[in-house]
Each structure stands twice: as C-alpha cells, then as structure tokens.
Image (cartoon, rainbow, N blue to C red):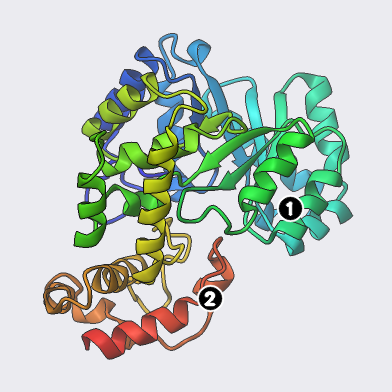
Amino acid sequence: MRLPTIGAGSACIDEPEAIKMIRYAIDHGVNYVDTAYVYHGGSSEVLVGKALRHGYREKVKLATKMPVWAVKSQQDMDRFFDEQLKRLQTPNIDFYLLHGLDGRLWKELVDLNVFSWMERKLREGRIGHVGFSFHDEFDVFRTIVDGWDFWDFCQVLYNYVDADFQAGNRGLKYAASKGLGIVVMEPIAGGRLAGPAPKEIQVLLDSSKTKRTLAEWALKWVWNQPEVSVALSGMSTMEQVVENVEVAGRSVPNDLANEELALIDQVKKKYEETGFNACTACKYCMPCPEGVNIPEIIALYNEYYAMKRDGKVSEKYLETVPPESRAKKCIKCGRCELLCPQKLPIRQYVSEAKFLFE
C-alpha cells in the first residue's frame, strides 16, 4: 500500500525499485506479503504478481482482500476474485480477507451469504485461509468474530498509541481466545511513530539505556505482544526494508523489559497530549472531488500540534500545498468521512487547518 511511486499519482509505482525491495525482504526472511484490490489505484496486485515471479511466489504466503463495498452479489465476488488471480499471476490465494469490515458492511455481506461463497472457495482449494480486516468498534468486532465458525485470522489496526482504538487491546485478546491468528496493520501509525518526534518525546527516548530508532520502538512493542502473529509494515524505501528486517530479526514476544514498557507508556501519553489522531495517511479519502489534498493537510495539522504550534509548520503549509489543494477548497461534502476506515472527523480537521494556516 505504500510502495515507492513515480510522479504524483499513487498508481504509478516505481516498479524496478518496488520489486527490488520486495525480493530483498523475501530473501531476508519475510514470508507474508499483503496487498489488496484497491491499493495504489489497482496497481499494487499487478506489481506484487510481477515481484513474485521466478520462484518467489513459492517462498511466501500471499494475502489480498475482497473490495466488499463494491460487492452486490456472489457473482461480483467471483468476478473480483478471478481478476485478482490474474493480476497476481497465481492459481490460489493463501490468505483472503473481507476488506475493511464495519457494522454496515458486515450486515450486507451476511445478507449476501458470503459464508457459502468462502466455503466454496475453500473446498476448491482457491483460498487457503479466510479472514477479515476491521475498522469499527469492539462490539462490532466481537459480533463478526462470533458470526462465523470458520475464521482463521483477522487484521486489526494496532500500535502503542492506538492500543485502545477500534478493536484495540480487547479485540486482540478476544480474537486470540477464539484461536484466530492476528495480523496487525499500522504498527507505526502510517509512519507517524517513526518521527521526527516532538522534543519532549525525543528527550524521553534519549534517556533510555537502550538506544533504538522510533520505528524500532514501535515495531518491537507490537511484536512484544504474544497474541500477534504478523505485523504489516508499509515500506516505501529500501532503507526502511533493511531496517525493518533487521529489527524483526532481533524481536520476539515478551522481549521488552518492564522499564522499556514504562518508557513507551510515557511516550504514548506525550503523543496524546499533542493531539495525536488516528490518521495513517492511507489515502482512502482521495481523490477529493474539490481537489483538497486531505492527507497532506492532516499531516501538517498533526505536525503543527506535535511541534507545539510552531509557526514554521504554517510556512511549510503555504510552501508545499498549492492554492488549488488547500483547506479553503473544502465544501464539507463528507465524502472523505464516509470512506475513512478510521471514522475520523476529517471535515473538522480540515476546517481547523484552514483557520490555522490560511
């Protein structure tokens, strides 16, 4: 979902570099590759299919997702699935997910009897394991987990700042108690926990006897949870791949000392004091019908508060966001909030950014 791109559009993946990154990761131990029908405007699955040629497909468990919001019948399920197999150049999917479930989408899929479709694909051997990714409250999560007896795994948003957001800690424990594998998305909160950190947070981290990068602290905290099966990290550069592989190589459950966990709790509280919100720059809100660059505006909005209302961030906004993409263009239509998997009050953030920066 965060592969390197060329130019402004997310669909224009830098194929040589992305393939090089994926194969480096696999050569150094990564054995689970996650994509989805909609990532990079539909280009992600195509790229992954190319990267997994020449023997790499056999080295990994491949995961992708059904775009459930676009499904109106079991015929649609077949159509999307067959297209995904062609894009990925594979006869089967190891781990197949219902993408981004919330209460409304779950009810629609139950009405379509998605269970019979998944059971058919399992019998045919076209799918190895079935699961779902999730964006809603814990009660909805529990309803979905209990709604079918054949779930193998689930995918949830989880990091040390958002540990109680959406499914959160309770969902992690509940899914594990039901025997589900747990795949964590956004362990670094869309890169925001990789820095640069506000000064008071950096001072805290510098006080630790153990020296780690911000990204390593975030990843190790997730891998420290024994319930976690896989942590997904969206990597955009080869440097990130190398670092993440190295960190994974020295991470196991229950590895962090009590004083390290206490330090992370202090860091979490400091982040929360800055107004840290759950935007992960996933860009599901894009494109905006009015041309507003929502992810960039919210990123600068977060940076402004993280840096204690630093006027330099206001200058950065005017330098980096062109007039045709600024917050003043927002007409509060609400389309972005309907699409946001984190259910964020985007119109409020954009309105506040307009007041702060314009």
342 vs 313: above or below: above
Judged left or right of residue 329, residue 66 is: right
Can you tell which mark lies on residue 293? none
Farthest-out residue, front: 259
| Three-letter amino acid code at the position of disc 2 | Arg
Crowd rating for badge 2 (residues with CA inside 10 Å; few <14, some 14–19, many 20+): some
Secondary element under disc 2, as helix, strand or loop, is helix
Q: Say if 201 sits above or below 52 in the image.
A: below
The picture quadrant where one finds residue 298 is bottom left
Residue 21, image x and y in percent? 30, 27
Q: Is 222 in front, or is 180?
A: 222
Q: Nearer the viewer, mark 1 or mark 2?
A: 1
How many labels were placed on the picture?
Answer: 2
Name the residue beneath numbered marker 2.
335
Q: Quadrant of the C terminus?
A: bottom left
The residue at 31%/55% (across/down) is 9
The quarter of the image holding the N terminus is top left
Q: Position of residue 189 (x, y in %)?
A: 41, 52
Q: Residue at the spot x=39%, y=40% of the render?
A: 259
Q: Quadrant of residue 356?
A: bottom left
Instruction: Give the residue at x 40% y 56%.
Output: 268
Q: Name the amino acid, label 1.
A: Phe
Q: Is residue 87 visible?
A: no
Q: Secondary structure at mark 1?
A: helix
Residue 159: percent from the left, percent from the top?
48, 48
Residue situated in front as seen by the camera: 178 or 68: 178
Q: Which residue is mark 1?
A: 141
Whole-angstrom CA distance, mark 1 to mark 2, is: 24 Å
Taking 296 as reference, is 41 above or below it?
Answer: above
Residue 3, percent across and down?
A: 34, 40
